[in-house]
Amino acid sequence: MSRNSAGGLSTASFVASLMIALVVGALFIIFVIPPDNVTPPSSSSATSVSTTTPAGRSTITSVSTSNSTSPSSTSTSTSSASTAPDPSIMNGSATITFPSDYAQLANFTLNLVNQDRASAGLAPVSLSPVQSGQQHANSMLYFGYFSHWDTQGFKPYMRYSLLGGAGAVEENVAFEYFPSHFRSTSDVEEAISYLENQMMFNDSACCQNGHRDNILSPNHNRVSIGIAYNESYVYLVQDFENYLFNFSQPVLSGSIVRLDGPSSARLGELWVYVFYDKSPAPLSAAQLNKPPYQQSYDQGIFIGGVVPPCSVSCITYPGNITVTAQSWKVSSTSANIVFSLSDFTRAYGKGVYTALVVEKATKTVILFSLSVFVYG
């Protein structure tokens, strides 16, 4: 049988100008519509698939790019997608299930990623304990959609924070459709191998090499791998992480953000930006399977930043909110940055506030991301 492939989503990191004002480049998604007779499963059942049966196989891939308190999650193993519970994140926790062969499949995927990184002279990534990848793979299979957003309206960096992520995340997502084909672990491994190959070597036309760049980023050191499948669909999520800090907990206490701890990498001068999203609203599978949820998205609206205490030639963010940190001590091996979100929340009200710690030297490498949900 032949494979038909369609490309998906790609991201570019935001960029900042050398001036105080911030210019945010789009985290863009390029989606190539699959053949007309190929769609993600259309019902809310994890076992349902499209009623159309194309002669061959179709693949769709996507990529995107962002920590926080550590809410609980419940992890179980299941051998059938039909037995999986609703994977939605509710009240800071989620029931996250894994296929019975997850360990083998995750290690298989990790080996593929690290082989590709080794070929580029890069250090391997390790398997992350954060379960954001599996939660999102489960969600896409369970509800029948394909997107970086989910049915709760969350973006990747929001899910990462809600599920206890303590770094910054950039997400690759892909799925393969092959009617009634995935009946064994080896069948799923074949699909994963093909998807990894497409993201590495057939990514330029669809996605401007966004997947490949994510796999080969020298800044990544961990990956949260999500794999969910039934007989006709395999969903693969790779949540690549920049995990550098071991911050003392809790990071968030009321409106105070406390980033205090050592870094595993040498630090230079840091910037802290704050972005804002309106409160996420529920989305249906039908909405998620159409634009704009398979097109570009960003980190939200840039609303200001946090600066070190100073008395002369102080940094400001003209036209936006400038907050002076209560503490700002950064060495080559650790950081102690403490600030309040109150000025931001008073100005914008309920919604999601995402604080990003960024290298000033590169202006594109996010070292840490924290999404804070304000409901009242």
Image (cartoon, grey):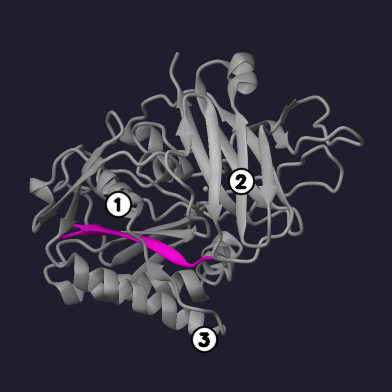
Q: Residue at x 46, y 46 (%)?
A: 248
Q: Which contiguous range is marked in magenta?
A: 220-235
- State how far apart marks 3 and 2 are (Cα): 37 Å
Pointer 2 or 1: first along the chain: 1
Q: Is residue 335 left or right of residue 66?
A: right
Residue picked out by circle 1: 137
Nearer to us of marks 3 and 2 is 2
Q: Is residue 9 left or right of residue 88?
A: right
Give the quarter of the image for residue 158: top left
Pointer 3 or 2: first along the chain: 3
Q: Helix, strand, or loop for circle 1?
A: helix
Residue picked out by circle 3: 119
Identified by mark 2, the residue type is: Asn
Residue 65, how many percent across, how many down? 53, 51
Identified by mark 3, the residue type is: Ser
Residue picked out by circle 2: 336
- State how far apart marks 2 and 1 are (Cα): 35 Å
Pick the front one: 260 or 213: 260
Q: Quadrant of the C terminus?
A: top left
Q: Is residue 42 left or right of residue 269?
A: left
Residue 103, how many percent across, how many down? 20, 69
Pick the front one: 113 or 58: 113
Residue 29 got which mark?
A: none
Nearer to us of marks 2 and 1 is 2
Q: Is residue 257 left or right of residue 114?
A: right
